[in-house]
Amino acid sequence: MKTRLLLLSILSALALPAYAAKPLVSDVNASQQAGTKLVDIVYNLALDPGQSAFVEIWFSPDNGLNFPIRCTDVNGSVDSNVTAGNKTATWNAETDWNQQFTANGKIRVIATYGDQPSGFSGSGSGGNAGGGAGQADASLKTVFMDVLWYWGWNTNSATNEWVDETQWFQMDKINSSIRVDPTEITNDKWNEVAEWALNNNYSGLTLASDSNASPRTNVTFWEVIKWCNARSEKDGLSPAYFTDPNEATADVNGNGIVDTGVDFFSPYAPGQDTNMNGVWDTGENFTDNNGNNTFEPKEYDDLNNNGQYDSGLTNPFRQGANISIGDSLHNHVDTNSSGYRLPTHAVYYKLASGGSNKTNWPWGNLSPHEYVSFTTEFQAPAGENDPPLSGPTEANRPANGYDLKDLIGNVAEFSESVYDTGAGGGGGVGTVKVQIFGGSYIGLKKVHANPSSGFEDNSMSVERYTDLWNNGPLDTGSPAVGFRCFVNN
């Protein structure tokens, strides 16, 4: 029997309140027995006097980003009738996670009053928590979401520098590895899916006039995410975009469920999240709205004003011209879906880097004008004020370090990042726009030749690939804007 080192770290979890105080799991520790696939787990369980709990154990292979694996082959203090005190259990990982290894394992222990499990069904994919029964396109390329360096403001040094923003993947619920279309979606691929969709309860997907290998352009953001859903269902995967929102916000206490209390906590805000780990920890500040000195978070926005939490995500976007989203798409995206999605801004930055870290461009720090191979490797003008090229064209240029083509130039690409342009800028409510990345054959700062089209020119000086973004409308297409998809592994 082969053995691999799991290098487990810990994560404790609270359970859904059912009595005067929640079951409290603390002091979780896990270690692998040398030369085996047995994992020893210890934890402390605090309960109301005379009560017992149902205890379940989950495993994350990606440092707590997702918990897809339910630990089923466990001996010791697990399942029903677990009483309070210091507890031990041993998990046989060979049963639930054989022939795999990770250097970033985490264990989650969930306790619930009574004799039934919590209802947590796992997050992410890659384990025994279920998901779509189909198979994503075999042409997709695997990219590991291991680290993300972004040129930005470092509050500690009070300077602009390369900052580790890997936390963005966790905030966007991106798995530790994803699979990505190697090129922008072509007219041929668009028509293949659209024809299937129009015969399977979809509407509003216009066929491209030419079924060729050029990128599909002149489609709206709404058409694109509807097409992504159709592609998912055609391939037997679960769709990602829904007309009815999930009202959940951040899981600020890390217990894997949506709490419906009254208190607030701001993840990654220095005034409250002092260790900047994205969750509330004992001793950290929070907004105690009922003044009882106990953290009882409200982890949802009551978007339909009915006074309760609604999980939503029951009606896939197949019909109609758009989704009523307010100022963000986030609540309409099933991030646990097995299906196709558009990249978030963080995913785009990772893909566009080609695996190069802390450099202005995938090839290094030379500007496009200085990089002698730019015009042969990228379908875009080298200078900000250079005339446009012809396009779009087929993906016949070299791939980057991730074996992906045209992340820079040819056509810019729709993202999943939709936001109110007035929010956070002191201007109140603005216009809801979608971020578009990569520059185009028209220019590194331009994605539409007509300035009144609603597609805004980038006003920044383009000094690195992370500057290649524009805002655009959700209901208008451009001849210089296309897209590609990814799926979580």
Image: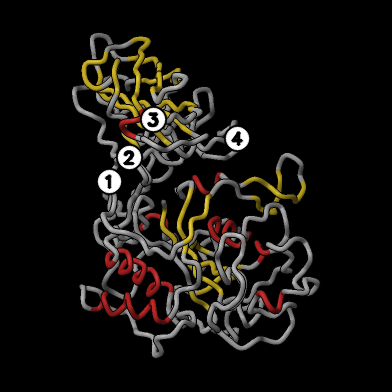
* Whole-percent x, y for residue 421 in the image: 54, 64
Look at the numbered discs 4 and 3 and tell me whether their residues touch, using CB distance below 8 Å: no
Residue tagged 4? 271
User: Is there a contact, CB below 8 Å, between mark 1 and mark 3?
Assistant: no
Say which residue appears at 48% left-offset and 79% top-offset: 215
Identity of the residue drawn at 35% across and 81% down: 191
Q: Amino acid type of disc 3?
A: Glu
User: Of marks 4 and 1, which one's residue comes earlier in the chain?
Assistant: 1
Earlier in the chain: of badge 4 and badge 3, it is: 4
Judging depth in this view, the residue of 464 and 247 nearest the camera is: 464
Q: Nearer the viewer, mark 2 or mark 3?
A: 2
**Which residue is label 2 attached to?**
122
Q: Where is residue 485 in the image (x, y as percent from the top left)?
A: 44, 65
Residue 176 in view, yes or no? yes
Left/right of residue 334 with respect to residue 275 in the rendered view: left
Single out the mark in the foreground, 1 or 3: 1
Q: Where is residue 54 in the image (x, y as percent from the top left)?
A: 25, 22
The span from disc 1 to disc 3 (Cα, nearest Å) is 30 Å
Amino acid type, label 1: Gly
The residue identified by callout 3 is: 296
First in sequence: mark 2 vs mark 3? 2
N-terminal of the pair, mark 1 or mark 3, is 1
Alpha-carbon span between mark 1 and mark 2: 8 Å
The circle drawn on residue 130 is 1
Which amino acid type is shown beneath numbered disc 2?
Gly
The secondary element bearing badge 4 is classed as loop
User: For numbered disc 3, what is the local secondary structure?
Assistant: loop
The span from disc 2 to disc 4 (Cα, nearest Å) is 31 Å
- Most distant residue in the right direction: 370
